[in-house]
Image (tube, coloured by chain):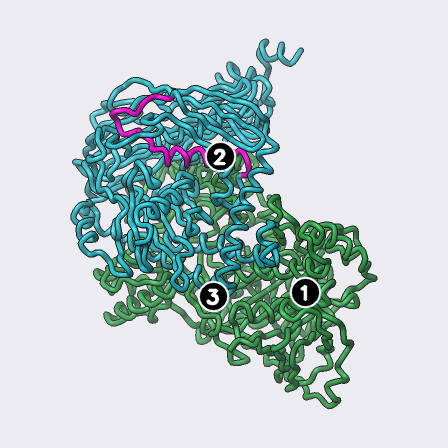
Chain colours: A green, B cyan
């Protein structure tokens, strides 16, 4: 039995699969601040026998919560003399261009806890000034006196040579063994001191929280009799062991959301779609990510709390590229100062929630609009819906101001929400040079199925896949993950003067690091696979393109191949290439997978009863192009493999509703996934 | 909802969707340029702007890295329309950097304009303007503090065709390559700019294909009217009346006399009039600013005052009027040098800011470093022997405001989504080492809310025969405080030679020679304070001392708080503070 649990803002989800491929799903309330209790609750609710669990996967929001709620440890920083303010100056950028009252992000370590020590390397990693250990000792005494619980160490040019950081950590472990410590080289080996220092500080800041949480969870799981291997979801779309996760917990920053992207890639493979766009609509946000040829895109450009108004905090660890926008089921519709209709990013959240929830919400939301247009049925809700209250909210807040009928205003809300989401989807596809016709859209989360078929047609995607259990799909994705570790090393070399021996030593060092880590995790060598990437650019450029390059060790022709792929990718992304121009490698990036055995998906039966027996009701639904149409609503649970239904149609399940327009059709595949033809030729 | 749109029977939601798509196109063009540029001044400093204008040259959407470009694109497009009119053909691309008209600032900011045709009809323009690292001229980096004529400042592109019906003017490209010091950088940026223009064109045509030309053109009207309505709504909330300020620019770089500048702002129910008449005539040195650059400065602060978070288009600025004498330091005429125009331009914003700050505390703060504090270092790299060129702004302190301390280490208002160059990147790429990058904790700008600290950045030359040129305005006249808050401190720089000789402090300096081991120490201003320092809470004062933002003496003398030097605990108040607190 394999079990995945995923902690979300409102619910903790569980998906399990037994050796026959049978899937069980359970949901239980999230239980802050003792999140581990929610995990135990959902296991008990699912009636999975803890002793039967062989492999346990876990996704958690504990790290991102500790960061955004500022509930991490009191942290001190030790850094190169002359540079303690690097963390506070940051990059000095001001995204909120015209607001002279803007506020730059406050550093996680205040100035008085940032200590300088004498030491200096140059850009080649050569030691110019040796580490002054007395300075380190003095800093430690001071930080101890100040009651610090965690220490970050970040020196200039440590990506080129970590020697002084290593010496410092050794000294700290000797003099102050119980303090949590992170050196920058342990979490990132990329240049740019502010970004590296920020990452190091954030890792130290969450380290005590992470350790406490993982330990408590581990203890609780053992208490209920679980003896399985335990893995935790990382932001790179792979997993790591509980033990390893405590060393660099910052890698769990996007632990939950990326599982859905990975799941989409796996599901795509199963149904023969190598290129997919993962599309997840929740209560407050919509997220999307592009998967090309089965490969989830990972970069180290992630920032927490970055918006178009604030710079945020960089986290240079590998995170799946996800574009997230403030548009979900609970997003509020409003009219701006110039009379334009807008939706989100403000959300009614779980409380009071949409007007339809009847919990005191007065602001019209996307969910309310879906109700008024017939996309959702009042029967979808757990409680009595006050239809008049919903109508009144849309009428007074939107319709009257635009001079529209209530229904047209509701449709307008959906169209604006769709337009916002369409822009996000375009950002990851068309604007990166991808043709949506080459991709299938995998839609999940509570709202994904409702919006996806019509949106996909707008975007130009031919096929939409609504997986089984769409609302808990992220947890399913976790069941399908492998162990994954990323190793990124800054290595700035012009490709025309590459020294192959030196380069291959670099590849070898990264491979050795990976092998050592898997060994520490007790993972067998024959199940390890490597992928090789290089961050490349034209000489003189700053920004790089991540290129999948030939496996190491390299021969001379591999350089040509890497260059050829770089030119191609550059043109794909930016519409031009400079074939004659010199190219440069900036980072080497090794991805190491520890392959885990995957469960088989079980097939569903074909339908014995006539299709009509699956019809729940016929209700009028308002469509953008066709107006009101009587629409058949089918019960997803009753549909068998192989049936095909023409739109307009709605397929309902308890936690989601799939809406198809006229000219679209849906087929149930052998596993029970809904495969939708969007009408795009 | 506009009446025009209703009469055409287009539903408001479609108009909104097309409007949002236009804004998205602007964003896409902007990022396309940054990601492909060859020069740090573009990809790190984001010293450029790109956008779309309608067929009449009105700005529809603009992506900005630096605020200073906010007024320039539409002037540029208008110049193309005026000069070429019927001779604008599909596939044409115009190049323009005339500082005195046509959206000019200085020669380094090179504009590109491309008409967009739909089925043979001119429907819009795609445009961008970017700071090229090099356009030739007497000094590396093309700007300097001692030029006296435009002809010393580089190549002039007086609105000419770079592409004619899709065919590149190779003669012009060769001419550029021959006249600039780093042709790969300059031409690389030019191609990146051309690619971004074409992205804009492609997306605009796609939009017309999808919704139909008429709906797109209606949405454009709607977009401009929407912007105007948003502005007017905010304008209605502003206090009405006349507000005046006088200030002084340090000097023009050639002569040492201060220059008086002034503004009279008149706010009525439907107009926001900025009258700069009476300001100093244009000068011999290169700090002269053109009228279009002045308009940009005024637009920046107009947005700060009305609605900083709104999408920008020409409709937004319809209530705005800018008046100035001809041939003033704000409205320079040929052949006045303009290469460091920003030293004057930002006064255009700062004067209005200062005039209105006391009455708009929820929008405005005390004065900030004001100057771009721009630096050029040129020389050879110690390992590769290749020439390098640093051209960059410096971060400094911002003013405090009601309820907030000033921000530390930020670029001035003329910049924006501008990134400093990381020390590790600078030391790899340039022939220098950075001895220090820290906050300038001089404790100036005392107040109930404290001015933000400036920054200190030191470059040590790693080879002989390097040169530094820098212009640090607000060197003699300090960032202003409000409501009893103290003034901030000066921008300045020193050169410290290996023999221990210290030269400076300077506000401006051209081509100062550096040999191996010499250090240039760049120090930026701390911003002005807000409110009486004696009203700052004692806990904050104690923490300020502990953090090293103010000294023990300043805690006592400015804030009236006596603090234990070892424990940083408050041990008492001065009689002055006690009296103020009524004890």
Is residue A130 part of the magenta span, yes or no? no
To which chain does the residue with label 1 belong?
A: A
The C terminus of chain B is located in which quarter? top right
Residue found at x 53% / y 74%: A266
Vertical relation: B132 (above or below) A610: above
SS label for mark 3 = helix
Q: CA distance from mark 1 to mark 2?
A: 56 Å
- Residue under numbered circle 3: B209
Circles 2 and 3, Cβ within 8 Å, touching? The answer is no
Q: Are labels 1 and 3 assigned to the same chain?
A: no
Residue A461, visible in the rendered structure: yes
Percent x, y of residue A180: 53, 47
- The disc at residue A13 is 1
Magenta range: B279-307
- Residue under numbered circle 2: B320
Nearer to us in this view, B440 or A373? A373
Nearer to us in this view, A681 or A492? A681
Nearer to us in this view, B501 or A153? B501
């Amino acid at each position: 039995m394999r079990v995945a649990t995923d902690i979300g803002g409102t619910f903790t989800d569980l998906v399990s699969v037994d050796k026959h491929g049978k899937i069980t799903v359970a949901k239980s309330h999230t239980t802050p601040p003792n999140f581990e209790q929610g995990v135990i609750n959902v296991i008990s609710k699912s009636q999975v026998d803890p002793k039967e669990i062989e492999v346990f996967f876990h996704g958690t929001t504990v790290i991102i919560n500790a960061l955004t709620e500022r509930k991490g440890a009191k942290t001190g920083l030790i850094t190169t003399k002359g540079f303690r303010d690097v963390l506070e100056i940051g990059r000095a950028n001001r995204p909120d261009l015209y607001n002279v009252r803007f506020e730059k992000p406050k550093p996680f370590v205040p100035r008085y806890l940032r200590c300088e020590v004498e030491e200096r390397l140059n850009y080649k990693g050569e030691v110019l000034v040796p580490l002054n250990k007395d300075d380190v000792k003095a800093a430690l005494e001071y930080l101890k006196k100040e009651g610090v619980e965690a220490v970050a160490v970040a020196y200039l040019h440590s990506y080129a040579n970590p020697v002084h950081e290593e010496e410092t950590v050794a000294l700290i472990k000797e003099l102050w063994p119980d303090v949590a410590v992170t050196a920058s080289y342990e979490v990132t080996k990329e240049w740019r001191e502010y970004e590296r220092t920020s990452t190091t500080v954030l890792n130290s800041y969450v380290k005590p929280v992470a350790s406490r949480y993982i330990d408590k969870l581990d203890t609780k799981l053992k208490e209920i009799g679980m003896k399985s291997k335990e893995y935790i979801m990382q932001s790179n779309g792979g997993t790591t062991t509980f033990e390893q996760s405590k060393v660099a917990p910052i890698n769990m920053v996007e632990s939950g959301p990326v599982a859905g992207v990975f799941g989409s890639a796996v599901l795509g493979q199963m149904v023969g779609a190598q290129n997919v766009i993962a599309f997840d609509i929740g209560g407050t946000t919509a997220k999307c990510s592009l998967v090309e040829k089965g490969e989830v895109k990972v970069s180290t450009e992630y920032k927490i709390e970055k918006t178009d108004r604030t710079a945020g905090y960089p986290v240079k660890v590998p995170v799946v590229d996800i574009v997230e926008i403030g548009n979900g089921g609970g997003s509020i519709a409003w009219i701006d100062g110039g009379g334009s209709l807008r939706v989100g990013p403000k959300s009614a959240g779980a409380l009071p929630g949409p007007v339809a929830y009847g919990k005191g919400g007065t602001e019209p939301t996307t969910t309310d609009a879906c109700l008024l247009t017939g996309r959702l049925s009042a029967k979808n809700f757990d409680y009595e819906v006050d239809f008049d209250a919903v109508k009144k909210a849309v009428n007074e807040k939107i319709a009257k101001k635009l001079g529209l009928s209530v229904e047209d205003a509701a449709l307008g809300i959906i169209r604006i929400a769709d337009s916002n989401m369409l822009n996000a989807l375009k950002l990851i596809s068309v604007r990166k040079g991808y043709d949506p016709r080459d991709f299938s859209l995998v839609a999940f989360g509570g709202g994904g199925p409702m919006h996806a078929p019509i949106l996909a047609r707008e975007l130009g995607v031919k096929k939409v896949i609504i997986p089984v259990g769409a609302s808990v799909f992220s947890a399913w994705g976790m069941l399908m993950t492998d162990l994954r570790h990323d190793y990124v090393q800054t290595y700035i070399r012009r490709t025309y003067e590459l020294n192959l021996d030196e380069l291959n030593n670099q590849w070898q060092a990264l491979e050795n690091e990976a092998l050592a880590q898997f060994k520490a995790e007790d993972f067998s060598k024959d199940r390890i696979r490597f992928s090789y990437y290089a961050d490349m650019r034209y000489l003189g450029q700053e920004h790089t393109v991540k290129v999948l390059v030939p496996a190491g060790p390299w021969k001379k022709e591999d350089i040509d191949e890497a260059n050829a792929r770089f030119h191609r990718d550059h043109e794909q992304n930016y519409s031009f290439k400079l074939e004659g121009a010199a190219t440069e490698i900036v980072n080497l990036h090794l991805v190491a997978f520890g392959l885990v055995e995957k469960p088989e998906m079980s097939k569903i039966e074909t339908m014995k009863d006539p299709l009509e027996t699956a019809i729940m009701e016929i209700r009028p639904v308002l469509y953008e192009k066709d107006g009101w149409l009587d629409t058949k609503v089918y019960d997803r649970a009753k549909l068998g493999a192989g049936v095909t239904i023409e739109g307009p149609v709605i397929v309902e399940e308890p936690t989601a509703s799939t809406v198809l327009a006229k000219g679209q059709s849906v087929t149930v595949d052998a596993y029970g996934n809904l495969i939708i033809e969007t009408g795009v030729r | 909802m506009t009446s025009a749109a209703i009469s055409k029977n287009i539903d408001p939601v479609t108009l909104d969707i097309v409007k949002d798509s236009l804004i998205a196109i602007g964003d896409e063009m902007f990022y396309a340029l940054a990601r492909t540029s060859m020069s740090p001044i573009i990809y790190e400093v984001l010293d450029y702007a790109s956008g779309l204008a309608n067929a009449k040259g009105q700005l529809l959407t603009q992506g900005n890295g630096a605020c200073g470009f906010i007024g320039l694109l539409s002037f540029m497009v208008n110049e193309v329309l005026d000069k070429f009119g019927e001779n604008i053909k599909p596939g044409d691309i115009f190049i323009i950097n005339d500082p005195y008209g046509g959206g000019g600032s200085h020669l380094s900011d090179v504009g590109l304009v491309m008409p967009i045709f739909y089925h043979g009809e001119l429907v819009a323009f795609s445009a961008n303007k970017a700071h090229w690292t090099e356009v030739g001229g007497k000094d590396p980096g093309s700007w300097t503090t001692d030029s006296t004529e435009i002809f010393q400042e580089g190549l002039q592109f007086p609105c000419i065709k770079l592409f004619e019906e899709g065919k590149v003017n190779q003669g012009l490209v060769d001419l550029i390559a021959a006249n600039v010091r780093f042709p790969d950088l300059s031409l690389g940026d030019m191609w990146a700019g051309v690619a971004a223009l074409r992205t804009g064109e492609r997306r605009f045509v796609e939009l017309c294909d999808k919704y139909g030309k008429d709906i797109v053109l209606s949405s454009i009207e709607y977009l401009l009217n929407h912007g105007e309505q948003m502005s007017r709504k905010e304008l209605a909330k502003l206090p009405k009346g006349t507000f005046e300020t006088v200030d002084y620019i340090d000097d023009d770089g050639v002569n040492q006399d201060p220059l008086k500048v002034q503004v009279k702002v008149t706010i009525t129910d439907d107009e926001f009039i900025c009258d700069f008449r009476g300001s100093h005539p244009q000068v011999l040195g290169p700090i002269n600013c053109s009228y279009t650059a002045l308009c940009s400065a005024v637009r920046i602060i107009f947005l700060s005052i009305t609605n900083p978070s709104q999408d920008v288009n020409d409709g937004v600025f319809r209530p705005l009027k800018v008046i100035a004498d001809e041939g003033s330091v704000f409205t320079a005429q040929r052949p006045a040098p303009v290469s460091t125009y920003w030293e004057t331009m930002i006064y255009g914003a700062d004067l209005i800011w200062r005039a209105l700050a006391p009455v708009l505390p929820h929008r405005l703060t005390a004065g900030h470093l004001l100057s771009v504090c721009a630096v050029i270092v040129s020389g050879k790299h110690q390992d590769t022997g290749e020439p390098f060129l640093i051209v960059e702004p410096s971060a400094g302190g911002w003013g405090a405001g009601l309820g907030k301390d000033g921000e530390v280490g930020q670029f001035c208002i003329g910049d924006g989504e501008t990134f400093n160059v990381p020390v590790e990147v600078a030391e790899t790429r340039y022939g220098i080492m950075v001895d220090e990058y820290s906050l300038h904790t001089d404790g100036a700008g005392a107040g109930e809310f404290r001015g933000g600290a400036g920054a200190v950045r030191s470059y040590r030359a790693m080879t002989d025969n390097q040169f530094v040129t820098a212009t640090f305005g607000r060197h003699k006249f300090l960032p202003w405080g409000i409501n009893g808050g103290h003034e901030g401190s000066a921008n300045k720089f020193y050169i410290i030679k290996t023999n221990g000789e210290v030269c400076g402090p300077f506000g401006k300096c051209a081509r100062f020679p550096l040999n191996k081991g010499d250090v240039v120490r760049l120090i930026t201003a701390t911003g002005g304070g807000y409110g009486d320092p004696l009203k700052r809470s004692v806990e904050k004062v104690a923490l300020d001392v502990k953090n090293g933002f103010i000294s023990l003496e300043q805690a006592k003398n400015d804030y009236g708080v006596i603090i234990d030097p070892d424990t940083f605990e408050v041990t008492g108040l001065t009689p002055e503070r006690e009296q103020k607190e009524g004890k």
